[in-house]
Image (cartoon, rainbow, N blue to C red):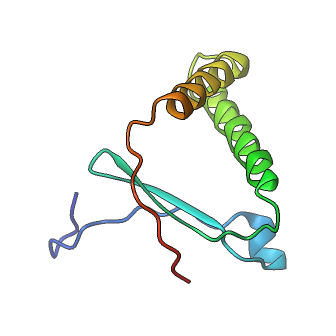
Amino acid sequence: MAGDDDTPLFHELEAPPDVREKGGHEILRASVVEGAVSVSLRRSFDDPFTWGVLLVDLARHAARIYALETGMSEEEALAQIRAGIESELDDPTDPGSTSAVN
């Protein structure tokens, strides 16, 4: 999808209200580009365990959005998200590459 001058459009989300009010720093940005996920992130935490907590928190938020926007229950959405996580951990579809840029 492109704008009037053929510049590709990027539909970015607004920062959450508490971030606009109190400040902070962005640690994760994920976008869908031609059907694939493109990610940039900062390590941000001293312990990788905290990323696990963050990822589960994101999964719960996503499940709530599915429950709000579809006929699916939050529990069913979370079960499907969990199944996707387990499947991808067991057999990655795209191991990709990662570099640190800040």
Residue visible at 66% across and 19% down in the picture: 79
Which corner quadrant of the image does residue 47 belong to?
bottom right
Q: Quadrant of the N terminus?
A: bottom left
Task: From the viewer's perspective, tell me whether residue 55 is left or right of residue 33.
Answer: right
Task: From the viewer's perspective, tell me whether residue 36 is left or right of residue 100.
Answer: left
Residue 62 percent across, percent down from the top left = 64, 37
Which corner quadrant of the image does residue 76 belong to?
top right
Residue visible at 73% across and 18% down in the picture: 75
Residue visible at 58% across and 16% down in the picture: 71
Give the vertical position of 24 relative to 11 (above or below): below
Frontmost residue, 90 versus 41: 90
Task: From the viewer's perspective, tell me whether residue 79 is left or right of residue 50.
Answer: left
Residue visible at 80% across and 51% down in the picture: 49
Frontmost residue, 40 versus 47: 47
Number of numbered labels in the structure image: 0
Give the vertical position of 27 relative to 73 (above or below): below
Frontmost residue, 100 versus 62: 100
Residue 84 percent across, percent down from the top left = 54, 27
Residue 90 percent across, percent down from the top left = 53, 28
Residue 61 percent across, percent down from the top left = 71, 40
Q: Residue furthest left?
A: 6
Give the vertical position of 42 relative to 73 (above or below): below
Q: Quadrant of the C terminus?
A: bottom right
